[in-house]
Image: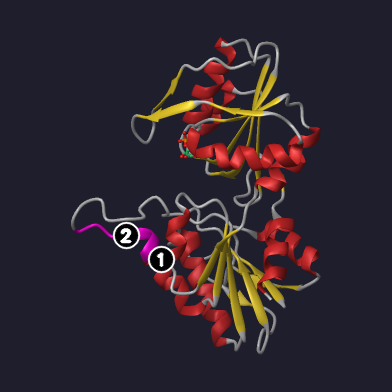
Amino acid sequence: MKIVGGSASLALAGAMSRELRADLVDVAFERHPGGFPDRERYVRLLGPVAGDHVVIVQSTFPDPMIVEYFLLADAIRDAGARRLTAVIPYFGYGRQDKRFFDGEAVSAKTLAKHIALDADELLTMAVHNPDILHLFPIRAREVSGMPALGRYLKTADADLLLAPDAGAIRHVREAAAVAAKPYDYLEKERIDSYTVRMTPKKLAVRGKSVAIVDDVISTGGTLATAARELRAQGARRVSAVCLHGLFVGAAAETLKALEEVVVTDTIPSAYTKISVAPEFAAAIRALG
Ligand code: R5P
């Protein structure tokens, strides 16, 4: 088995190659210093993959990383790989999982269809709606990253773990089981893409350090609103431990409402402190 990391996921690809004791194939992402002036992506495999089972690790954020994924997959197939496993730690476009209005693209299906042209199977993590996995004409599985958050939370300054909305209860429950810590949840109402409202709900947080557990940070609005509600109820410290950190727009500023924000390496950033490599490595071993 060989691992190829796209430029969105190089650190995770390296960690997975160590976990799996598989060679990491070097890739050039620029043909000349500075790349193409119009910023088009470029890839060149610098090692052989003919006859190999190859695992591409590449999140689809930001958008140019989708093009880069397709370039890598095509280059790997052209180079004669025997089997191609797509590990897409963060799978974007999952929110457009159906046609809400006539004439719309079902974006999740569009990506699924094109990924299946070259890949034999797909592994991803915390997709917006797990039902989109049925849109793939190949085997597609969701790998949980919550055990990784749970391992981190076990020794973190956190008395109580909290889901910011009912939809995240399945996540916090799993992380809490690994961390061996209690959990609760808030009730969130989404007004629009940038605004959320928390329904006041009495929580036993007075004097406690609360860690919010969620799948995605986009604008940071959910976390900031939850942090204000928790402080109003007497929480001593509010932190967040999440899987995917998109940090859109002014998120860094918005997130100053929390004492600490930690995310995983599904999308690398200055907030990345946790690796989900063990989770993906175990899932690849289980593929057989
Ligand atoms: C919502 O369903 C997700 O679990 C996140 O809570 C949400 O996507 C976070 O978005 P934002 O950071 O923009 O509030």
Q: Is residue 29 left or right of residue 220?
A: right
Task: Give the image location of residue 246, x and y in percent.
Answer: 52, 44
Residue 12 pos. (x, y %): 69, 58
- Magenta segment includes 115: no
Residue 131 quadrant: bottom left
Q: Nearer the viewer, residue 153 or 17?
A: 153
Question: Which amino acid does the dot numbered 2 rest on?
Answer: Val
Left or right: residue 105 compared with residue 271: left
Which residue is pictured at 44% across the width and 69% down the height?
136
| Disc 2: which residue | 106
Q: Earlier in the sequence, mark 2 or mark 1?
A: 2
**Residue at position x 66%, y 60% in the image:** 10
Q: Is residue 138 above or below residue 39?
A: below
Give the numbered dot on residue 135.
1
What secondary structure is found at the residue carrying circle 2?
Answer: loop
The region drawn magenta spans 103-109
Q: CA distance from mark 2 to mark 1?
A: 10 Å
Does 104 lie within the magenta span? yes
Q: Residues within 10 Å of mark 1 (few under 14, many from 20)?
A: some
Report the amino acid beneath label 1.
Answer: Leu
Circle 1: element type = helix
Residue count near mark 2 (Cα–Cα under 10 Å), binned few <14, some 14–19, many ≥20: some
Q: Nearer the viewer, residue 105 or 43?
A: 105
Q: Is residue 234 above or below residue 260?
A: above
CB atoms of marks 2 and 1 within 8 Å:
yes
Tell me the residue at 69%/71% (across/down): 3
Where is residue 249 drawn, in percent x and y? 46, 36
* Relative to 154, residue 158 above or below: above
Q: Is 257 displayed left or right of 38 in the figure? A: right
Q: Look at 53% across and 30% down and name the residue there.
A: 164
With 164 as the anchor, is 152 left or right in this view? right
In which quadrant will I find the N terminus? bottom right
